Amino acid sequence: MNRTTTSKVLKSVADLKAAGLSDRADLDAVAEKYAVGITPAMVALMDPADPDDPIARQFLPSVEELQITPEERADPIGDLTHSPVDGIVHRYPDRVLLKAVHVCPVYCRFCFRREMVGPQGLGTLTAPQLDAAVDYIAQHPEIWEVILTGGDPLVLSPRRLRDLMERLAAIPHLRIVRFHTRVPVVEPERVDAELVRALLASGKTTYLAVHANHPRELTPAACAAFARMTAAGIALISQTVLLRGVNDTVETLAELMRGFVENRIRPYYLHHPDLAPGTAHFRLSIAEGQALVAALRGRISGLCQPVYVLDIPGGHGKAPIAAPTIEPADGGFSVRDWQGGTHRYPPDGTV
Ligand SMILES: *Cc1c(COP(=O)(O)O)cnc(C)c1O
Ligand code: SF4
């Protein structure tokens, strides 16, 4: 395979052209609307000879992004409807999102927050805004967990992360700090000993959700970054977006989930793609998603099963959406096994 290498993050259509990754002039209109960012690690994973390359599809802008469908919306999961102070989203009683930054090392073309992230996005919280966000958590004793997301919280320097973690460590009712990040996959060298230490907060438990969508993303360098985190006592979980043309086959999903488990990353969520503007080319139907997750069940270990979820548009939270395997029938239930056979429960002949 003839791969391209680069030592810098590609941030513009001109950068893409210089790297030989795009000769399409009409991408300027896309790049004006949505940020472009591709790290050297992801450039190295692309196969320029493959027009359907699953890595390129996630990061290379495409003119299809200019097609907005009627159901798409700028704030697909309703973040802005539950934001009591800047940077905080408080939708569920016991946990909040803290979005300190709105920049990322890469810009995924399917991003659900694509209208908020990037150089023209919501920016980084100012010092007083971050103070107010931390105060909000301190003043709400029901908050058991804070989820650092963004943008990508691991773009913060270890010093700034350490400062933030020290302040969170001082909040007694807060027990769990969870990061959602793509950095260990797209910029694994950033996850060095200093950064790993900065993710720990005295007396709190750190979880980190690794965002990866294709098994090829689990490179030796990424796996080494995962190992540095697990060795430090950080519990790893996964998050994947189900994407047409990237991971919409049982084989790809099975390999990805097994790859997570082999690296001590417990599969957590498989997200149905959100209704973000210009992302119709990535979306599958819910029925297609349900068929894929039903096929995973039984075929691979229970350790490898993610929960298939939909973020309900309008800010109503996440719902598990796998097809039910049990339904009421004849005063009892009908249960479907992993091969599609149905069985009565309780079995005939019992009361
Ligand atoms: C997704 C999300 C969470 C986290 O939900 P979990 O089901 O705990 O992973 C929390 N708050 C908001 C606003 C969210 O969108
Ligand atoms: S890393 Fe996350 S927040 Fe950033 S562009 Fe990708 S999906 Fe969006």
Image (cartoon, rainbow, N blue to C red):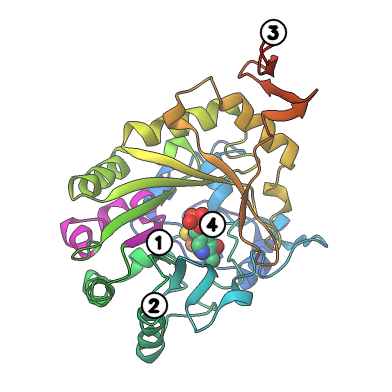
Q: Is residue 40 visible?
A: yes
**Quick one: label 3 or label 1, which is nearer the N terminus?**
1
What whole-number distance in Å separates the C-alpha atoms at marks 3 and 2? 56 Å
Q: Nearer the viewer, mark 4 or mark 1?
A: 4
State the residue at coordinates (56%, 39%): 53
State the residue at coordinates (52%, 79%): 122
Q: What's the magenta region?
A: 176-198
Number of numbered discs: 4
Left or right: residue 91 compared with residue 133? right
In the displayed structure, 139 sits above or below 308; it is below
Q: Secondary structure at mark 2?
A: helix
Callout 4–callout 1 Cβ contact below 8 Å: no
State the residue at coordinates (30%, 51%): 188
**Quick one: label 4 or label 3, which is nearer the N terminus?**
4
Q: Nearer the viewer, mark 4 or mark 3?
A: 3
What residue is shown with label 1? 9
Which disc is residue 349 wearing?
Answer: 3
Q: Ligand 2 near label 4 (Cβ, under 8 Å)? A: yes
In the displayed structure, 91 sits above or below 227; it is below
**Quick one: label 2 or label 1, which is nearer the N terminus?**
1
Q: Quadrant of residue 238?
A: top left
Residue 71 x, y percent position in the rendering: 80, 61
Callout 2–callout 4 Cβ contact below 8 Å: no
Which disc is residue 137 wearing?
Answer: 2
Left or right: residue 344 compared with residue 214? right
What whole-number distance in Å separates the C-alpha atoms at marks 3 and 1? 67 Å
Circle 1: residue type: Val
Q: Nearer the viewer, mark 3 or mark 1?
A: 3
Please say whether residue 177 is one of the residues in the magenta stretch: yes
What whole-number distance in Å separates the C-alpha atoms at marks 2 and 4? 30 Å
What residue is shown with label 4? 108
